[in-house]
């Protein structure tokens, strides 16, 4: 019995390789398995090397899996480019209309498209392949049948034929596999679950979290990989006094957010690096005029247009200092899909509490992943709203040290929200002592955000592993294996990157901190060093997430 | 907020056209409040960066809300305010450089949305606050600190520009005609859609165009500005284009889109009503993803 | 640079209008080079970001220089190139989202400068590369992933926009009419000033407008696109405005500013000649500040 | 005999207080003295608290001076606001038409405007005041007369009357002062100079340096305090194949620069913080596509619109990381007017050498200062131009590790300069190994820039004073006084901030480094700590430069 099945569908954009992996995952999830998908594709609509991967397991999953049990490939290039990731003893299923593999001892050729056409169900070729994979890996065929039945019974005329056709296609694949006699270890039986589970994507978790946090206005400009959050909001943030709009550029998005935040609403946008780079001046205005808003940056490969569909963690430095002048924008970066949900709530709470901009750093690999998770416990949701002025301070919005009541237009306390240095009522003045007072005020508010939670294990160890964002998954897996292997390394993680929980910072003093991160500069490690922590980065900048094995060996190398 | 804030020390130069615009805006707001029994806090003044933008601090009497943001972004800020709070009266005040150079990109989108706000543009054909560089509306071959050989770029025709990007309501006025300007601003605020009041507001320090605009009989200067005759049909966009095509400046209502004007927020409300869609709760959104 | 680079794997979808534009552009350049005996390296293709922008990599045959920058900035990049090197033939290729949404701010300035470049705009009324969101030229009430209730903003009229910002040379064409398009692009490149060739280039995947444009007798669809009749005087801007005011799409020369067109770099050269000014040496500049 | 005379003219914008200080300085400079001016005024054309200060000395000058020997004030507010800076025994000259000072033991009231009007020379009121100041401070009146004669003999009809009128005005002031009997120590006689000297402003030094460096194209958008450099170029970079243009925004400036740099020209822009904040995406493109260009950021108070006319050093962090993704933009920051000239040349050389963007960090206080300096030795000017492709590498512009020949349009080697990740000829491709190769390539080029010079004195001391930019002046003065007073502190300075000269970095290891800088965050100190240096910042964020006395006492405090 094997605990894991990792399948990759590889081919070209438009050949449904991503869909194949996700269909397989959904089916397995419904069969009770834990699943996690990952896909990578070029920045174009048709063509180009693409693949989708599904990991199916009887145990909770942290990563899409380093090595493949089954590689399904649509063409020669896909075979050549992905073979290296096939584990020893792994099997290949390939499109025999496209190319041939001489040695068929571990490979199975299927003319899936032709078979599907001939069966009068051209769209079913992926299902044929899934059938073959299921057979090879000993996945319960019944489970797949019941999935197909559910999935295509949508109460439309002709559902029956479609279901029948697809089940037939499934069996066509099963037979093809059966003929070969090839067989992997059977997959373990699925676990039993106490709590209800949901199948959710990262961007959905971020978006629904934002709705849970009370977001009222969402304005964005399309950009991969952040567009999905915008379109999700278009479809789901639809209440009477809710507003979702497509801006004409990211400069319009961020300045419109400033307007909405100023007008008293919880407001948010989603973008990627190029958009964030255009928001620097606007974020400075939000910082200066003290306007609550949240920018979700779904990181992709940079700089410039960079690698629009690949994953990277290289926007951290700019997120904290997106514009000129003295500012330090709060940054929150979720490490998993569950955390993506809670991170959105936290980001909105922070922005409302300290009355300023907050940046939520997501990543392509988190936003696009689909995974089964426990239904979040909504009773734990706590939302905050800004302190609203009842006129107590008159128009002196910027009076006092730190946060003061926020006058909402239409209500009392008319003032000028000003991006130029200003006095208490927001009138422009550049007198030295006023610039000092107001600068101190803006930074003092950050002290209100020292409530970030963090994980800390084996805190006695001299060396601590401290990943951030989506690197949490592979790092955690590597850490678990290393600890099992008797390596003594501590574990810390927080999604609250700026300001860092002061308790965490203290606990790191005097330790050697290893920071795995997906960028060249070692951006988070750099930041930690500037805070006096002895941190060194473990970097990777391939546009792909870390492999657990690579991380493990690198950590061992550093410890040696 | 000049009167209420002795510390605040911004001054316009003597004779600056913006003084007239200030008084007109104060009057327009005062009348609106009186007529509607609406409180002044229901109005938000969104200011661009420039001498003109300091309007938001210079206004006296009952104080509206204000926001003085960054250069060129008054319109998108107004978009954010109005889309969040359709109940507010939102007025943009900006200069020709702010509104028509770095901020020009934002005019078309608001016009297409028919965002229900009023923009008061103070056009002095110069960058005042930065001490006199050419702006899009500086005349061809005028010498400024950035146009040593005389301006080589053609003068932008703001009216043609507004018509081209689809601005549905367009009035042209002079800062010196305070009474008329106050009326124009008030009516523009009442228009349910995107309205622009484009004001010739001379810069006495860097580009004094008073005599050019009003003309000067002694010097034999024909007035550049002239009142639009009754012959003009403001609902005919082609006629409007013909009216503004030459370099003279027609004063009055240049264009007003025919038919009823449906503001952006109305459209959205109606669309939602049509789709009779409801906001799902977080619980519902998550439950929909349950693995059966 | 498709043919020469097997590794480069970008593909347009089958039937994408951009294929036709590619061939037309290749032909236009080939003819220009032949006629002038000019080398292909004298041409620079400045691409926007979008499916359309990938043109710069897709071109086959003799390879021009290319620059594939950031979203919406093809025009200012072209301004930098042409102002530095008036001897180069600079062609911008961009989509409706890139050119008319985030990049819209850059059209007016080049028009007023009369920058001597040609922009080929591939208008498919959609954001293709980002998988089908509304663009400024998406029709009102069309449903896309960002317009769930149907598009609420009015469709931008790109022709009226170009006329409004002062574009001196404007041609409208269809991607399917390759021969005509090639001719249009070639003549536009010859125009000494800022020329735009606006091409309807349908997106077969997200907004297939072929039948709308060409019409469909069986389905009884009137063609949206129609050839401009001889009656139209392209030198009359008011006539041009009248021509493009409705939603139909006239094909042909919409506008061409009357009189001789003086390109930006010519103007500057002439101005410098008039001022007969010389570049002072560093020594001279410093010595002028000597404390006597 | 006193070595120094520090005079401040205080009043409102539009009252010629800045002009007064500069006229006084020019006159003294012509008299052979060393001079340095500083002024501060609000962001408006008329009105608002403004003052101009002139320091006149028989010795070389590092700062405008902490305390005033003479305060000239136009109104009550100017008197109240500036009195604190008057040294003990200092004198006040005030506009007696505006207000009265009861105790006239150290103050002299002059109705300068009325006197000027009555003398039929209304513009001469400032000269009357200068006459008074000169008499009080024992500045040679003959020198002033000859200055006036030179200054207003411009070969125009009526020159004689103007000169006579102004000399008369000068003496009116002298008499007013004489009547009071008030008198400061006489000013030392001017030094004798071997080398020719020039009176120059900071922005002129930067601009002429750029011309010396071979700049061919300059495109900018007006913004204080960077507009003066743009207008200087408009007037002086006028050669046949030179281009200067006003852009419609900073986004147009930076992307136009990319076009000009791509087209083979040495190109530059000047801007301030808000403009830099809009250039993030464009700078990322220049970094990614490897386009040489220089952005001069004349720092002012930030963030957002901030304090447009005040000085600050708060753009450093953003200058190095102006956009998303992995980049590290080279940064050079001159510390004096002489250095401003050389820094422009160095910035152009760096950009041409490594083929990428370089940021030149200036400051309001440097750009606007006028000072007498020795005529720069032009024989020391060395300019570099990029390696141009002769077609040797075909279209493989991005081939190899680090810099490769640059194909110029019109010549051989047609390629695509690409902001998306690309292969050797610039075609888009997002394959993992290519992103790695190209990222390494972009960073490796920075090694070409490790030729930055630096100052290092008393390197044996355990504590080192390391200011940056314009803070060099006051820091140097403080260091000299402290050393004279027997305090053992080392001195280091470089204008090459990123990459830092590796030798400097090494020399700082193990030391305690004090970094005075005009910002809240201690931006440069933060950066040093991230490089493992034990650096702590001494910050000030008033919108004004450091006073030497304040720095000295703070350094002493830190050492205690
Ligand atoms: C991003 C940015 N760029 C440039 C500036 C500098 N700036 C301030 S006001 C202004 C233009 C002012 O001209 P206009 O809008 O016509 O206003 P006016 O002063 O003439 O009333 C400029 C360029 C800025 N504040 N921000
Ligand atoms: C600053 C920035 N914002 C957003 C994007 C994402 N993006 C890439 S292409 C594109 C629009 C494409 O539409 P269009 O210009 O019409 O080109 P098409 O694909 O339709 O040919 C967008 C929004 C980006 N690359 N950069
Ligand atoms: S500079 Fe011109 S625009 Fe500015 S205040 Fe003075 S007169 Fe008015
Ligand atoms: S998505 Fe549309 S525009 Fe893009 S390549 Fe496909 S058909 Fe062409
Ligand atoms: Mg103006
Ligand atoms: Mg498009």
Image: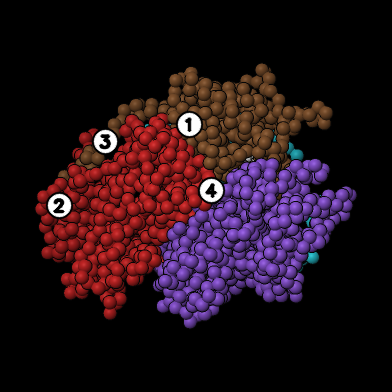
Chain colours: A red, B brown, C cyan, D purple
Mark 1 and mark 4 residues within 8 Å of each other at the beta carbon:
no
Q: Which mark is residue A430?
A: 4
Q: Could you tell me how far apart the alpha carbons at marks 3 and 2 are, in whole angstroms?
A: 27 Å
- Residue D365 vertical placement versus B181 (above, below): below
Ligand 4 within 8 Å of disc 2? The answer is no
Q: Are marks 4 and 2 on the same chain?
A: yes
Residue in view at x 51 percent, y 65 percent:
D551
Image location of residue D83, percent across then percent down: 58, 52
Q: Could you tell me how far apart the alpha carbons at marks 2 and 1 are, in whole angstroms?
A: 60 Å
Front residue of D381/D413: it is D381
Find disc 1 in the rendering and name its residue.
B64
- Check disc 3: other Cα within 10 Å, few if <14, some if 14-19, many if 20+: some
Ligand 1 within 8 Å of disc 1? The answer is no
Front residue of A505/C243: it is A505
Task: Determine the image quadrant of residue D396.
Answer: bottom right
Q: Are marks 1 and 4 on the same chain?
A: no
Nearer the observer, disc 4 or disc 2? 4
- Residue D265 vertical placement versus A377 (above, below): below
**Mark 1, chain letter?**
B
Nearer-N-terminus badge (1/3): 1
Q: Could you tell me how far apart the alpha carbons at marks 1 and 3 are, in whole angstroms?
A: 36 Å
Q: Could you tell me how far apart the alpha carbons at marks 1 and 4 are, in whole angstroms?
A: 23 Å
Residue farthest to the bottom, as pictured: D460
- Check disc 1: other Cα within 10 Å, few if <14, some if 14-19, many if 20+: many
- Check disc 2: other Cα within 10 Å, few if <14, some if 14-19, many if 20+: many
Q: Could you tell me how far apart the alpha carbons at marks 4 and 2 are, in whole angstroms?
A: 64 Å
Nearer the observer, disc 3 or disc 2? 3
Mark 2 and mark 1 residues within 8 Å of each other at the beta carbon:
no
Image location of residue D15, percent across then percent down: 68, 46
Find disc 2 in the rendering and name its residue.
A32
Find disc 3 in the rendering and name its residue.
B280
């Amino acid at each position: 019995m094997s605990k894991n099945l990792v399948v990759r569908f590889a081919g070209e954009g438009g050949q449904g390789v991503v869909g194949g992996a996700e269909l397989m995952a959904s089916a397995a999830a419904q069969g009770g398995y834990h699943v996690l998908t990952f896909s990578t594709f070029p920045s174009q609509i048709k063509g180009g090397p693409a693949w989708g991967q599904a990991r199916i397991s009887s145990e909770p999953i942290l990563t899409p899996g380093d090595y493949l049990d089954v590689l399904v490939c649509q063409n020669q290039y896909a075979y050549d480019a992905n073979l290296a990731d096939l584990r020893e003893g792994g099997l290949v299923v390939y499109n025999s209309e496209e190319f041939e593999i001489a040695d068929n001892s571990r490979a199975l050729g299927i003319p899936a498209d032709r078979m599907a056409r001939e069966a009068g169900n051209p769209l079913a070729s992926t299902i044929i392949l899934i059938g073959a994979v299921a057979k090879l890996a000993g996945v319960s065929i019944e489970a797949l049948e019941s999935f197909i039945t559910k999935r295509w019974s949508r109460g439309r005329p002709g559902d029956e034929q479609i279901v029948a056709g697809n089940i037939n296609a499934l069996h066509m694949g099963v037979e093809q596999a059966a003929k070969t006699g090839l067989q992997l270890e059977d997959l373990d039986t699925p676990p039993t679950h106490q709590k209800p589970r949901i199948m959710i994507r990262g961007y959905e978790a971020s978006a629904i979290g934002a709705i849970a946090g009370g977001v009222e206005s969402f304005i964005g400009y399309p950009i991969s990989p952040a567009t999905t959050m915008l379109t999700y909001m278009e479809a789901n943030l639809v209440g009477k006094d809710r507003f979702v709009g497509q801006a004409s550029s990211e400069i319009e998005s961020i300045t419109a957010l400033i307007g909405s935040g100023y007008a008293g609403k919880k407001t948010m946008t989603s973008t990627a690096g190029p958009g964030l780079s255009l928001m620097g001046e606007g974020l400075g205005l939000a910082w200066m005029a003290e306007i609550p808003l949240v920018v979700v940056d779904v990181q992709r490969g940079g700089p410039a247009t960079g690698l629009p569909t690949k994953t990277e963690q290289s926007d951290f430095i700019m997120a904290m200092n997106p514009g000129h002048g003295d500012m330090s924008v709060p940054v929150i970066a979720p490490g998993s899909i569950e955390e993506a949900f809670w991170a959105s709530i936290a980001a909105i709470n922070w922005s409302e509490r300290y009355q300023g901009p907050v940046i939520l750093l997501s990543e392509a690999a988190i936003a696009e992943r689909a995974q089964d998770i426990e239904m979040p416990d909504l009773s734990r949701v706590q939302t905050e709203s800004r302190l609203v002025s009842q006129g107590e301070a008159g128009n002196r919005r910027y009076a006092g040290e730190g946060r003061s009541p926020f006058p909402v237009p239409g209500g009392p306390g008319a003032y000028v929200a000003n991006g130029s240095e200003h006095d208490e009522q927001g009138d422009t003045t550049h007198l030295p002592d006023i610039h000092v007072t107001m600068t101190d005020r803006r930074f003092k508010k950050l002290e209100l955000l020292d409530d970030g939670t963090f994980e800390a294990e084996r805190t006695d160890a001299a060396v601590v592993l401290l990943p951030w964002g989506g690197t949490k998954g592979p790092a955690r897996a590597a850490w678990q294996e290393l600890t099992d292997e008797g390596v003594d390394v501590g574990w810390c993680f927080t999604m609250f990157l700026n300001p860092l929980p002061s308790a965490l910072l203290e606990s790191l003093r005097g330790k050697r901190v290893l920071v795995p991160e997906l960028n060249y500069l070692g951006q988070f490690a750099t930041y930690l060093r500037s805070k006096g922590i002895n941190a060194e980065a473990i970097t990777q900048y391939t546009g792909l997430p870390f492999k657990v094995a690579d991380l493990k060996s690198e950590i061992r190398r550093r410890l040696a | 907020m000049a009167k209420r804030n002795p510390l605040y020390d911004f001054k316009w130069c003597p004779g600056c056209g913006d003084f007239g615009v200030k008084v007109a805006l104060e009057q327009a707001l005062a009348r609106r409040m009186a007529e509607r029994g609406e409180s002044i806090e229901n109005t938000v003044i969104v200011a661009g960066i420039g001498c003109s933008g300091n309007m938001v601090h210079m206004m006296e009497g009952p104080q509206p809300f204000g926001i003085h943001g960054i250069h060129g972004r008054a319109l998108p800020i107004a978009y954010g305010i109005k889309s969040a709070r359709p109940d507010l009266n939102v007025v943009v005040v900006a200069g020709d450089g702010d509104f028509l150079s770095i901020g020009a990109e934002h005019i078309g989108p608001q016009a297409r949305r028919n965002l229900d706000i009023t923009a008061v543009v103070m056009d002095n054909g110069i960058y005042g606050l930065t001490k006199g560089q050419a702006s899009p509306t500086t005349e061809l071959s005028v010498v400024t600190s950035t146009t040593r050989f005389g301006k080589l770029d053609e003068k932008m025709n703001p009216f043609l520009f507004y018509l081209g990007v689809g601005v549905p309501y367009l009035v042209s006025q002079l800062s010196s005609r305070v009474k008329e300007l106050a009326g124009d601003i008030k009516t523009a605020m009442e228009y349910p859609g995107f309205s622009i009041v484009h004001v010739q507001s001379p810069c006495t320090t860097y580009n004094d165009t008073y005599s050019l605009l009003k003309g000067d009989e002694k010097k034999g200067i024909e007035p550049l500005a002239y009142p639009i005759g009754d012959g003009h049909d403001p609902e005919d966009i082609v006629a409007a284009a013909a009216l503004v095509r030459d370099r003279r400046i027609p004063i009055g209502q240049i264009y007003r889109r025919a038919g009823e004007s449906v503001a952006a927020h109305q459209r959205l409300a109606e669309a939602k009503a049509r789709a009779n869609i409801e906001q799902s709760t977080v619980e519902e959104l998550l439950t929909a993803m349950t693995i059966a």
